[in-house]
Image (cartoon, grey):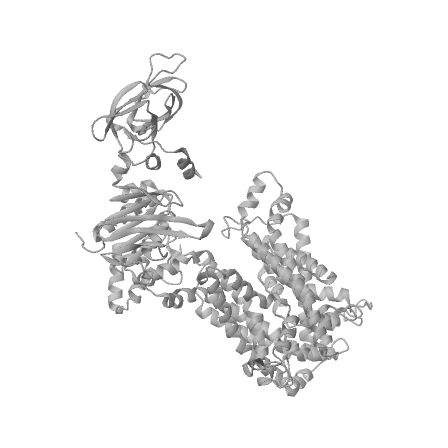
Amino acid sequence: MKLGLTVAFLGTLLGFIMAYTQARVEFRGKKILHIINLVPIISPPFAFATAIIVLFGRSGMITRGIFDWRPTLYGFPGLVLVLTLSFFPIAYMNLLGMLRSLDPALDEAGSSLGANKWRVFRTVTLPLLIPGFAGSFLLLFIESIADLANPLIIGGSYTVLASRAYMAINGDYDISLAAGYSTLLLLPALLVFLIQRYWAQKKSVVSVTGKPSGRPTMVTSLPAKVFLLTVTGLLTFLILLVYLTVVFGAFVQIIGVNNVFTLDHFRYLLGGFANGAIKTTAFLALIATPLAGIFGMLIAWLVIRKVKRGGEALDFLGMLGIAVPGTVIGIGYAITYNDPVKIGDLTVFPQVAGGGAMLGGAIAIVMVYIIRSSPAGQRSGIAMLQQIDPAIEEASASLGAAGGKTFRLITLPLISGAFLSGLMYAFAHSMTTLSPIIFLVTPDTSILTQKILAEADQGRYGNVFALCCILIVLIMIIGGLINLLVKRTQVSIDRPMVTGR
Amino acid sequence: MAKTTGNLRLEKLTKEFGNGAEKVVAVRELSLTINPGEFVTLLGPSGCGKTTALRMIAGFETPTAGKVLLDGDDVSSLTPDKRPMGMVFQSYALFPHMTVFDNVAYGLQVQKLSSSEIKKAVAEVLDSMSLSHLANRAPNQLSGGQQQRVALARAMVVRPKVLLFDEPLSNLDAKLRAQMRVEIRGIQRRLGITSIFVTHDQDEAMSLSDRIVVMRNAVVEQVGSPDEIYRRPASVFVADFIGRSNFLTVESAAKSKAGQAKIVVSGKKMDVAAQSKALASKKPVLLVRPESITVAASKSQGKSVGKGEGRVTNVVFYGNHVEYTLDTHEGVIISVVSDPVYDEIVPVGKIAKYSFDPSRAWLLPSESSEAMKEDRS
């Protein structure tokens, strides 16, 4: 709890500062900064935790190497640092979107009534962003209490619910204890999810017109600019440093101790240790990606266009995949599908999880990938469909095109952007997810993220970094391919134009 | 050009939304026959049910009860794509991912015409609307008026039996709107396509229509030609909605000839034309349009306002006309005097005599104040 609150507070604050800088300060390199700030979202777990240990830990390259200072990073402070760094981009994206859609005329109205910039910021901008703050805060809260990977690495003796559940299964083999921890995790997460949805609905009352009538007023006061740019710069530098460490660490013997160039880690990993895992992970993720994408679009389309009543409920069901902490989903699957589902003697659903399951449990893993990553596509699909004037589809119908034809010729091309970005997210997320998967892997299906955990546990950071590099490269390659597809098929439409005017 | 197809009949068309206590009747028993080639406007304040009516005709809403008959065939159960009707939307609803040409060609492609036929038909319609040079543009590269034309071309090219317009001009500026009105009417006359036009703008309705259907709170208040609606409105509501009106208090009213009444207004006896239910009403009111009332300075500028007089509370000089607001015993009266003699304009604060030709007046039954309140909200 304390962890969740601290991380949520710091992450939202950082996210806001970054978003505000991005939206309201003029400076060079804005775009690059934006991309760097988003990278942590798709980065593999452990990358942060391990890199931070190497940089700032007891024998960290910076803490000890430069300042000869040996702080204890394990436990609460380290965890807060790592979680904040990994999750602030969620708040950043959220708040940046809101800041950009605020009608600049509101600020202008404020200043024309005689308020100075600081006052406008305090009395107009901030209050309008409250739903965004609340939403981000709650999301970060869920993410941080449910995170498993980082507490395992850097938590030290500070245990969180997720890591206790993991220990219960992998140490004590006590499934019911794990289920108990899961329930404890599930309750606040669901509660927060519900509150957040409530907020999101209220948000529409706020005058986010989406049609800015002028240019937003930029920050011109020098101290404010210096402050914003300093924080932003430091944070960005830290992120870069982490990734440099990851890459550097992958190519040297032992980072910080023996910085001699080597390909040993890669040789070891690709020579057998992780070869199978790389193939399996990529293969399963590639199966899950299109399914998740289609699933998300389908739900979005049903919610927005087809189901008049119950659309809310359907949307909610679809979003559960992301609202429920990964640990809970993993344990849930492990318990539910460890035995075939039978009605009488008839097997309705075969055993898909655990040892001896069909295809070595691969089916359960793919299922988890799908339900974990389809909500993102669902969200962007819904957002996209909501922007498309229903009259466009009606126009097609009145010109003689039946339902299926309209969907194929009009609706699908218009939401292709959302579809493909959904695919991209699905792949990246499937490749990097750990917490639900760790309960489902079997000797036949080893997954990259789980290999990383094993290596991190052993303190073989070189291997961890090399694996992270492999993951990142894989994601970039596949992401690049999907992006190419996006570019080729995506309709060049400005967002406001989707109304068909 | 007389056309024989495109006869549209609505029979007791009704649409209810929601159910139980939250049930809202959007359209109640709308019956109407529209002749081939006729231009009919559904006019009314927002929420009166006009758009719902149009969407039922197009097939986007399923009627709760009643029928839509096209040339004698019941089309009520057909989906929109099966109905030979074209629609022009308020937002134009151009397909943003297609060029102007592809937008217009879409309906023909759906009909599976050969590409040479499509090219010919599209080129023709684009030419007739002076859009040929824009054929390869994307919709978002067009101005509002151009988008409007493309939307019209797209709906027309499939030769629908009925053209439906859902407030298509409301997103244009005033000048362009007037220009598009003329254009739409010209094309519609030339092609003789039966057209139904939904609007809340009385100028649009007056300038476009053969007949106007005035709707209010889900029911039809009056159907008639523009001059009937203006000169002989069926109710105070219609009179108030179309143009500007003065409603004078009537002191007494009695029947005279058919369709006429003997009345006393501000102490004067006169014979006026009367709506059929006017005399049955407890307190009929006399409609006199502002342009029918003349104003002249009163000789007695005493303190009290006599009968047939009013104190001038506002004068606006527009150049080609003067608009007076008078405070009288019969209520506030607005008078528009055209081609005014500048020296004879009565200034604010003075007492003015007003008069009107009884043949320009129209006796109406009074409206319950509750009904009026409902419209305001």
- Most extreme residue toward the front is A344
Q: Is residue B95 visible?
A: no
Residue B9: percent from left, percent from top: 26, 52
The residue lying furthest to the bottom in this view is: A271
Instruction: Please state, as top left, top right, bottom left or bottom right, where the C terminus of chain A lies in the image.
Output: bottom left
For the point 72% across and 68% down, the residue is A161
In the picture, measured across the screen, residue A256 lies left or right of residue B6, that is: right
The residue under the point 76% across, 64% down is A77
Q: Quadrant of the N terminus of chain A?
A: bottom right
Q: Count up the numbered dots.
A: 0
Task: Please tell me which residue lies in front, A242 or B20.
Answer: B20
Q: Nearer the viewer, residue A62 or A441?
A: A441
Q: Horizontally, is A64 left or right of A444 in the view? A: right
**Residue A456 in the image, given as x and y percentages of width and height:** 72, 77
x and y, in percent, of residue A472 in the image: 61, 74
> Which residue, as the protein is rendered here, is positioned at the far left?
B1
Quadrant in which residue A376 is drawn = bottom right
Left or right position of A265 against B106: right
Q: Is residue B316 visible?
A: yes
Residue A89 in the image: state x and y as whole percent: 63, 62
Name which quarter of the figure residue B154 lies in: bottom left
Judge by depth and name the residue closer to the eye, B339 or A377: A377
Above or below, A45 relative to A222: below
Above or below: residue A497 compared with residue B214: below
Q: Is residue A68 above or below residue B263?
A: below
On screen, residue A67 above or below B7: below
